[in-house]
Amino acid sequence: MPEETTDELMHATYRALCKHGYASLTMRDIADESSKCKATLHYHFDGKRDLLVSFLEFLNERFTRKIAAIDADDPTTRLFALLDVACPDDEADDSDMFQTAMLELTAQAPYETGYRDRLREFETYLTGEFESVLRTGIDAGVFDDGVDPERTAEFLLTTINGTQTRRAAVGHDAAEMRQMIYDYVETTVVSDESPRRTEVHAE
Amino acid sequence: MPEETTDELMHATYRALCKHGYASLTMRDIADESSKCKATLHYHFDGKRDLLVSFLEFLNERFTRKIAAIDADDPTTRLFALLDVACPDDEADDSDMFQTAMLELTAQAPYETGYRDRLREFETYLTGEFESVLRTGIDAGVFDDGVDPERTAEFLLTTINGTQTRRAAVGHDAAEMRQMIYDYVETTVVSDESPRRTEVHAE
DNA sequence: ACAGTTTAACTGACCGGCCGGTTAGTACCG
DNA sequence: CGGTACTAACCGGCCGGTCAGTTAAACTGT
């Protein structure tokens, strides 16, 4: 109930996930990352599943805030900013470990409707954002009006998904891959008459 | 040692994976799908990991044979045939369950070097095939000579990966997604002067 | 040809450890 | 006093792995 504690447990879950991965994540691991004990987790949540579903909701909020923080107006900048948020190539801290754990969680979605629903929520939100920016870009004439916003948004989502999967699984370089997404967007989305974009995505 | 038994166990593993998924796959499950008992698995393999690594090798061989069976000569047909093999939209039997299990296995690759190595092997092989067909296509003039075979092959791999991830995780329609890959290939790879391709990928 | 021996393939019963979850209780606070 | 937050100790079940055999086929010496 105390918001403070819930928050602490969410962050503990994050750390535990990075350290152990989802597959070998135990309640004990999470407790050890916090100041509380194992039984307390069961006091606040209905079980492991419930805790992790809450964790996914926690992540969704976080992510939504990040997107809301984008203040770019022109569609091109905004589109690339979205790509950067959705497909981080953070060399920072334990981002890699976290992405890996998220992939594991994703792989469990087919068996855990709770997980699946949150992931879906997340995906539809992101797809919506892409669609919206694509539409405004087309209307403004900076994007090629031949592109289908809906399909292109889906395509981008899929490509981003693939990037993260391959990064975690076989260690494929994410930055390189993201460059390919950029290229794809520049050649097929941004209309030729549009002013040339150069390295908006620089670190 | 007896090839017959090994083969039976590989097929049993396949069925068990489809039924239970990787996460809750037990030695018992695999044994139950075969005519042998749990202890026999340990007699033939050094443990669960070893068995699954062997299973991945078994899959690699299978897949390689499937690719070798493609007899298309012209690059366009061959490219699309490769896509079909690498990204099946089988509504057939338990293909969905299997893809899901494979995703779980992929998600474990970061923790199991055995898995990771086999997946890498698989990926480099497939990338090589894509690269090769792209090169021949470019040389033959049927593909746009602006495409970078190496990068495009990587991009295709990533997109296919993403398709399968999203199919399993959030139930996104694979056929729809594959159509987008086709479109991508047609618009950016196949050169404009090349004869129009229509529904090579029909069922 | 055949008893004796070895060896590969296989099995049922068992074990140790771990993990999610429970429970009986404590500390504290309004 | 009552209820919220929390805890140490415990439990049942399961799973990977082991082990002490059993069966049957192959091999060996005579």
Image (cartoon, coloured by chain):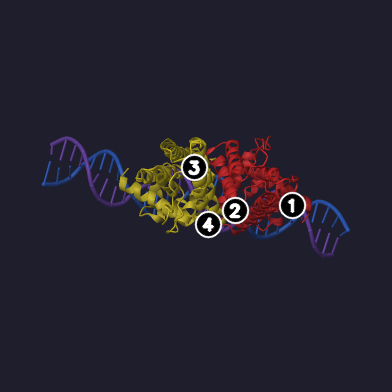
Chain colours: A red, B yellow, C blue, D purple
Work out whether mark 2 precedes mark 1 in sequence or the reverse, and give the earlier one: 1
Are the residues at dot 4 and dot 1 in contact (C-beta closer than 8 Å)?
Answer: no
Secondary structure of residue under mark 2 = loop
Q: Residue at x 67, y 58 (%)?
A: A46
Depicted A110 relative to depicted A173: above or below: below
Depicted A60 relative to depicted D26: above or below: below
Q: CA distance from mark 1 to mark 3?
A: 51 Å
Tell which subunit mark 3 falls on: B
How crowded pointer 1 is (Cα within 10 Å; few <14, some 14-19, many 20+) is rated as some
How crowded pointer 4 is (Cα within 10 Å; few <14, some 14-19, many 20+) is rated as some
Tell which subunit mark 2 falls on: A
Secondary structure of residue under mark 1 = helix
Can you identify the residue that label 4 sits on?
B173
Q: CA distance from mark 3 to mark 4?
A: 24 Å
- Expressed as whole percent of the image width and height from the top left, the position of residue A16 reads 65, 44
Can you identify the residue that label 1 sits on?
A6
Work out whether mark 3 precedes mark 4 in sequence or the reverse, and give the earlier one: 4
Q: CA distance from mark 2 to mark 1?
A: 42 Å
Asked if marks 3 and 4 fall on the same chain, the answer is yes
How crowded pointer 2 is (Cα within 10 Å; few <14, some 14-19, many 20+) is rated as some
Which label belongs to residue A148? 2
Residue A24 visible in this rendered orientation of the protein = no
Total tally of numbered discs in the picture: 4
Identified by mark 3, the residue type is Val
Secondary structure of residue under mark 4 = loop
* In front of the other: A38 or B95: B95
Mark 1 or 3, which is nearer the eye? 3
